[in-house]
Image (cartoon, helix red, strand yellow):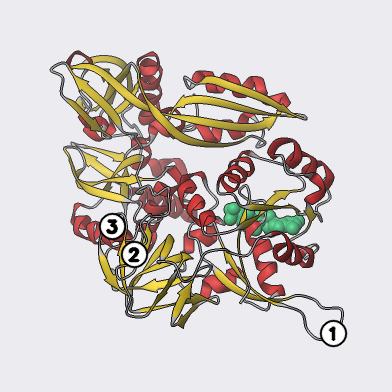
Amino acid sequence: MKFRNFSIIAHVDHGKSTLADRILESLGAMGERDKREQTLDTLELERERGITIKSTPVRLNYTRPDSSGHGGEEYVFNLIDTPGHVDFGYEVSRSLAACEGVLLLVDASQGVEAQTIVNAYLAIDSNLTIIPVVNKIDLPAADPEGAAQELEEIVGIPAEDAIFASGKTGAGVAEILEAIVERIPAPSGDPEAPLKALIFDSIYDAYQGVLLFVRVLEGRVGLKDKINLFSNGKNFEVDRLGTFSPGLIVGKTLEAGEVGWIAAGIRDIQDAQVGDTITRTDFPTLEPFPGFKPAQPVVFSGLFPTDTEDYRKLREALERLKLNDAAFSFEPETSEALGFGFRCGFLGLLHAEIVQERLEREFDLDLIATAPAVIYRITMNDGEVFQTQNPAQFPTRDRMEKVEEPYIRMSVMLPEEHVGAVMQLLQERRGSMVTMNYIGKRVELIYQVPFAEILYDFHDRLKSISRGYASMDYEIIDYREGDLRKVDIYVNNEIVDALAVVVHEDKAYSLGRKIVDKMSEVIPRQMWAVPVQAAIGGKIIARATVKAYRKDVLAKCYGGDISRKKKLLNKQKKGKARMKQIGTVEVPQEAFLAVLSTED
Ligand SMILES: Nc1nc2c(ncn2[C@@H]2O[C@H](COP(=O)(O)OP(=O)(O)OP(=O)(O)O)[C@@H](O)[C@H]2O)c(=O)[nH]1
């Protein structure tokens, strides 16, 4: 059989899923979206947000058009989907490692953006053949030649290689299929060599345990084979295996060049990490596929049930989610203010939001989430070194010799006219410029920025000051010393540990101010005035007051407009769910995220 293994990469919203649907449809397979409804994990959120989170491969049969009319050569295509968000960069790189080529999509009206470049470089680093596709050519604002030219200038892919296409009208799809055969090389591994298979994704199935999504690079694997995982040395026996078409098709063997799934009685998804290599214990390969990195959460946040009775339910829900997500971590956390909850680790902010939304929706939990934080490395005066990602545990300045924080390398693509404003934003975020490249009328800025500085409202600010035109991408590079302080928050003269934040000394006052102001707005009025204060090491730096209320809220609805009254009451009732009693004051979720608010 002749194989072609490829993936589609693109900046978010450049039309990857739509084009994949078209390709599937033209090869007689179900559309990507229908497929998701029917098979594997139906991640509701993924569909709603239109963001691909899990890589779902699909095997397709392609017959080349033949002018003689006797039917052309037959090919098997494996299309491996990749997640489309910066939080999942490592997963993308492993999916690409399972391929020989990629379709690099660029929206004909938007041109090259930050993730187009990052993804293209990932493909180049993996030695993949790149087929440039200028997509959405049906749009009135499309400039296909311009987009192809940008690809040549920025990524170095010849403009004349580009295929002009539209996932909407189907234009260019036949040409793409032919290019896949002609330009992407056939897989080269030797089926007689020892087994070497790369895990590029895994999911949990209640009946079969963990299903490994693998690309066999060398050798072959069959039923009852004993397999060994390189990273942890664990052995398992293959129960079932097969390919994707697009559901799970059961087979007998998988050989070099093939993409498929393996069930081997693995119960814990931690044992089957993306990027790990499988071999056979009776005929082992000596070297794993390079580049394995265990999944590392980099953003942490506390999750607490609003109703303390729900603690066990939350634990069970977290355990259930963890079955399917090796990149997510949690451990019990106790807060004086919020009671029992969990400190959870995520790959990024989007990942954090997705987990929280799933907990609330699928498990019907009401949660309070604390502001996200990064991992700090602290050296105490006595030489002790430790790491913490919990601001509540951050020591005061006099006890620490130094603090280090993670830095990222960020690339931002934007139109020339917004460069000044974006540079100023990066400056405010303690960024330092590495380079600036002009590409036609657009600019690529490369900066080094403390990771914590982009956790809150950075992305929103970037979008708003560039009228939506700037796009960004980042990776964590190293740890550097910084003058960081913990800002404590007091509500009604009581310290609320879960509200503490860590911030650079230069920003402590303005951030303290912003938090107390926002909190005084969102905490409901009480019978008496409630002070809200920000402090560093016990010294108050900002103060605001939640005023006492004078009138009944319903008094406003003078004249007895019943429906309006009802609405108001309902609104209050709904708001209740996300409140937490602290001392005598009810504090809503918004107050915990006051630090995230975008107003300055
Ligand atoms: N006019 C036009 N619109 C398109 C075309 N392809 C996709 N779109 C629209 O562009 C938007 C994004 O398309 P998707 O296919 O979901 O984009 P995606 O790249 O898969 O998005 P992520 O999975 O988030 O990376 C949707 O609103 C589509 O309807 C096209 O060829 N022409």
* Residue 459 x %, y %: 53, 35
Say which amino acid is labelled 1: Gly
Where residue 203 sits, quadrant-wise, is bottom left
Contact, mark 2 vs mark 1 (Cβ under 8 Å): no
Report the residue at 40% width, 63% height from top.
202
Secondary structure beneath disc 1?
A: loop
Relative side of 512 to 129, left or right: left
Residue 269 in picture, x, y percent from top left: 31, 61
Marks 2 and 3, how far apart in space?
36 Å
- Residue 496 visible: no
The crowding category of the residue bearing disc 3, from other C-alpha atoms within 10 Å (few below 14, some 14 to 19, many at least 20), is: many
- Earlier in the chain: of badge 2 and badge 3, it is 2
| Residue at image coords 37%, 61% | 285
For badge 3, the amino acid type reads Leu
Query: x%, y% of residue 427?
Result: 53, 18
x, y percentage for residue 351? Answer: 42, 49
| Mark 3 or 1, closer to the camera | 1
* Residue for badge 1: 69
